Image (cartoon, helix red, strand yellow):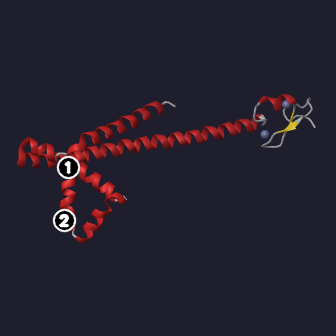
Amino acid sequence: MKCYYHESKDAVGTCKDCGKSLCKTCVDKYESGLCEACEKKRKEKIQKELDIKKENLKKNAKSVKNDTIKDLVIAAVLSLICGIFGFAIGGFQGLLMTIGFPWGWKFINQIMTGNFMSWLIILTEKFWLVAYIIKFGLALIIGAFTWPFIIGYKIYLFVKANNFEKETKNM
Ligand SMILES: [Zn+2]
Ligand SMILES: [Zn+2]
């Protein structure tokens, strides 16, 4: 048997992927022990998989950015409405108390799906008005204290996704 690539040399092995006979030089050429064509094919396949992975990460970063902007815009509009309402009732203090209400409401809706707040779901089914008053009060309190942190966190997520997008742009 002669080497597929070098007709004058004796074959000492075969390519693991295609089975072509290979001489000592060819067998030692790549760590994988594959022939030149198969080595190239395998590398291309790995590269393709990496490209797909990168593309998905980029898509993910983009959707994080879009979602964050959407969240911030909606919350800003709602906060403005609540803030104006609060200001009309209690001046600047009223504004401070109501401005975070949309964030608080959203936060409660999010944790209500977990076991922690299941009592509120049960209460809503039996005494919906009482449940809504409690929810309303909790949203006011939670919102008033947490909204700057939530907005900060959203901005952080946005910046992180944006940086990732920039970093991977030319890759
Ligand atoms: Zn091969
Ligand atoms: Zn050879």
Please indicate whether residue 143 sits to the left or right of residue 61 in the image: left
**Looking at the image, which residue is at 32% across and 39% down?**
153
| Residue 87, image quadrant | top left
Please indicate whether residue 161 sits to the left or right of residue 79 in the image: right
Please indicate whether residue 119 sits to the left or right of residue 87 in the image: right
**Looking at the image, which residue is at 6% across and 43% down?**
91
* Residue of label 1: 141
Residue 134 at x, y percent in the picture:
20, 59
Q: Secondary structure at mark 1?
A: helix
Residue 52 at x, y percent in the picture:
55, 42
Residue 23 at x, y percent in the picture:
87, 32
- Ligand 2 located in image quadrant: top right
Count every numbered label the image shows and give the total: 2
User: Which label is found at residue 130?
Assistant: 2
**Looking at the image, which residue is at 32% across and 62% down?**
118
Q: Quadrant of the N terminus?
A: top right
Going by the picture, which residue comes out furthest to the bottom? 126
Q: Amino acid at mark 1?
A: Ile
User: Which label is found at residue 117?
Assistant: none
Q: Amino acid at mark 2?
A: Val
Please indicate whether residue 156 sits to the left or right of residue 48 in the image: left
**Looking at the image, which residue is at 40% across and 45% down?**
63
* Residue 161 position (above or below residue 74): above
- Marks 2 and 1 sit apart, C-alpha to C-alpha, by 17 Å
Q: Earlier in the sequence, mark 2 or mark 1?
A: 2
Q: Crowding at label 1, few (<14), some or many (≥20) Cα neighbours within 10 Å?
A: some
Q: Secondary structure at mark 2?
A: helix
